[in-house]
Image (cartoon, grey):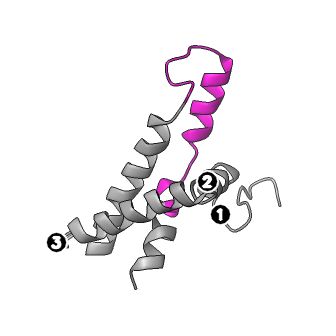
């Protein structure tokens, strides 16, 4: 990995890789993400700007981010650990994670 290369194990960065790893690490979490993906596909509608899959990806990315933020045990804390965790979550490529779930269910 070069200085300017921040990719990690085929993902855009370490933060994205590790969040995706933990989301898919246990059956309940994986099934939750997959159900969110299915719902986002079912509810998405194409328009002149975005395809149905693009709309679903955007919605799913937002819902996955919200899922992780809601489960953050340090969300109400004000300390160095909370700041570091929030900074790391800010680096996550939610669109990339959403796309990985959508690729499983949409061609």
Crowd tier of the residue under label 1, counting other residues whose Cα lies within 10 Å: few below 14, some 14–19, many 20 or above: some
Q: Position of residue 45 (x, y in %)?
A: 18, 70
> Is 20 above or below relative to 77?
below
Task: Point out the residue furthest to the front here.
Answer: 28
Furthest residue toward bottom:
107
Task: Please provide percent x and percent y for residue 12.
Answer: 63, 60
Return the mark for residue 47. 3
Q: Position of residue 1 (x, y in %)?
A: 83, 61
Considering only order in the chain, which callout, 1 or 3, is on the residue closer to the N terminus? 1
Instruction: Give the magenta-colored segment's residue range.
Output: 73-97
- Is residue 38 shown left or right of residue 72? left
Q: Quadrant of the C terminus?
A: bottom left
**Residue drawn 29% across the image and 64% down it:** 39
Where residue 34 sits in the image (x, y, percent)? 44, 65
CB atoms at circles 1 and 2 under 8 Å apart?
yes
**Separation of marks 1 and 2 at Cα, in angstroms:** 7 Å
Q: Is residue 25 magenta?
A: no
Label 2, on which residue? 16
Quarter holding residue 24: bottom right
Q: Which mark is residue 11?
A: 1
Q: Is residue 78 left or right of residue 31?
A: right
Q: Quadrant of residue 4?
A: bottom right
Residue at 37 percent across and 50 percent down: it is 63
Q: Secondary structure at mark 2?
A: helix
In the image shown, does 32 or 43 lie closer to the viewer? 32
76 within the magenta span: yes
């Amino acid at each position: 990995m070069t200085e300017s290369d921040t990719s990690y194990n085929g993902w855009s960065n370490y933060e994205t890789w590790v969040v995706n790893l933990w989301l898919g690490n246990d059956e309940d979490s994986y099934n939750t993400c997959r159900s969110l993906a299915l719902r986002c596909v079912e509810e998405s509608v194409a328009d002149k700007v975005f395809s149905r899959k693009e709309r679903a990806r955007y919605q799913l990315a937002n819902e996955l981010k919200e899922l992780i933020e809601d489960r953050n045990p340090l969300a109400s804390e004000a300390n160095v650990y909370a700041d570091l965790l929030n900074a790391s979550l800010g680096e996550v490529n939610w669109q990339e994670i959403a796309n990985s779930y959508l690729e499983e269910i949409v061609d």
